[in-house]
Image: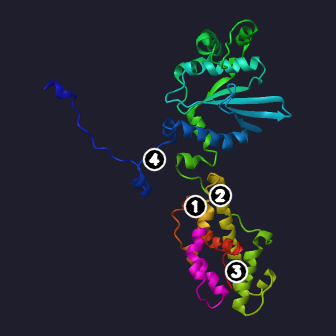
Amino acid sequence: MEHEKNIIDIVEPKIKIKLSNTDLLLGKAIEPIKRLQVISDKDFEDLVREWTCGYLKNKYVKVRRCGAAGDMGRDVIAFTHYEKRKNLVWDNYQCKHYNSPLSPSKIWIELGKLCYYTFKEEYSVPRKYYFVTPKGISTKLSNLIDTPHKLKQQLISEWNEKCRSKITAGKTIELVGDFLSYVESFDFSIIDDIDPQELIEQHSETKYFYYRFGGIHKTRPEPVNPPENITVSELPYVKKLLDAYSDNSKSVIKDIKELLAHSKYYGHFNRQRKCFYSAESLMKFERDTLPPGVNAFEDLKEEVYDGVIDIVESEHKDGFQRVKEVCKVARNLNMPSYPLYNSVKGNDLSGLCHHLANEDKISWV
């Protein structure tokens, strides 16, 4: 029959990517741009704070967040020069959360405040004025921003309805006389926007990105080699290793130079220093990757302590044997709860034993 020509068989979909266990547990990952589009106003406010602290502060000499009341049309203000508050060069980032792309009707009051308060010399004209939104700006607003003279004309025509009685409470701002001349000569080419994808890319340079958007963590750099000389911060665990070697040799080994006469101890000692610094590098990698306040490295250290303390407190022939047994157990511990689990190396877990010894939480003799 004629209507049956429009009936199409459903083709069974096929997944054309390799699936991991995580994919099956959590489902298909949501792309950052889609996460941004459904973000709540409170979470967007947090994201702006993360972006400000983790990205803008590295780009400008000073960054401030203005309060909601009395901000005079400023949100995040970022200074490129800030010498004794003279010769200020700054950019304004106006962050707005709406459930749809930002339209012209939403910006007239903001541009009105910009013109009025700079005319009154409450603050200087910014170098750039950006709109930052989770869903970007509408095509109509984009066209206006791309043609500054039309943006100016539209603001003037919308003034009485959108700005006249809304800029400051209890006051009517007439667009006449010197103020009208000021607006007509104002450089609206400073108005721009931060595209949502660009905002994500900038946010990805912060320590908050994986917490906010998920995804694959950046690759951990190779651990640094231990410095040639023992540092002051190493002295506690080094002293405890020397005690362990002394306990095994039944003679007092007071310093590193004496280890040269004992190849067994000397090789072991160098390997333990390598492990100590491997754990140190994990701590620094976490600091550069995860947001402040997570303290996952301290939690990992505590888990290692719980995993090895029974071995530490068990009977051993001597301290050297205790070190080796404890580090062997630590190296085989499974720590899937650690946020950077895929970056953990066996040397890290052994090294954490020496971090614990350094903090006097465990001893070998």
Q: Would you name the residue on which mark 1 appears?
A: 343
Q: Say which label, 1 or 4, has the lower sequence index.
A: 4
Residue 157 place in picture, x, y as percent: 61, 9
Residue 29's disc number: 4
Quarter of the image holding residue 132? top right
- The residue sitting at the bottom extreme is 250
Quadrant the N terminus occupies: top left
Quarter of the image holding residue 275? bottom right
Q: Would you name the residue on which mark 2 appears?
A: 285
Q: State the residue at coordinates (33%, 46%).
A: 14
Q: State the residue at coordinates (61%, 10%).
A: 160
Start and end of the magenta stretch?
Answer: 302-327
Residue 179 among those drawn in magenta: no
Q: Nearer the viewer, residue 242 or 211?
A: 211
Measured Cα–Cα span from mark 1 to mark 4: 20 Å
Q: Nearer the viewer, mark 1 or mark 3?
A: 1
Residue 309 among those drawn in magenta: yes
Q: Is residue 187 left or right of residue 26?
A: right
Q: Is residue 162 visible?
A: yes
Q: Say which label, 3 or 4, has the lower sequence index.
A: 4
Measured Cα–Cα span from mark 1 to mark 2: 9 Å
Q: State the residue at coordinates (59%, 89%).
A: 315
Q: Say which label, 4 or 2, has the lower sequence index.
A: 4
Q: Which amino acid type corresponds to the residue marked 2 in the rendered image?
A: Phe
Measured Cα–Cα span from mark 3 to mark 4: 46 Å
Q: Which amino acid type corresponds to the residue marked 1 in the rendered image?
A: Ser
Q: Is residue 97 left or right of residue 57?
A: left
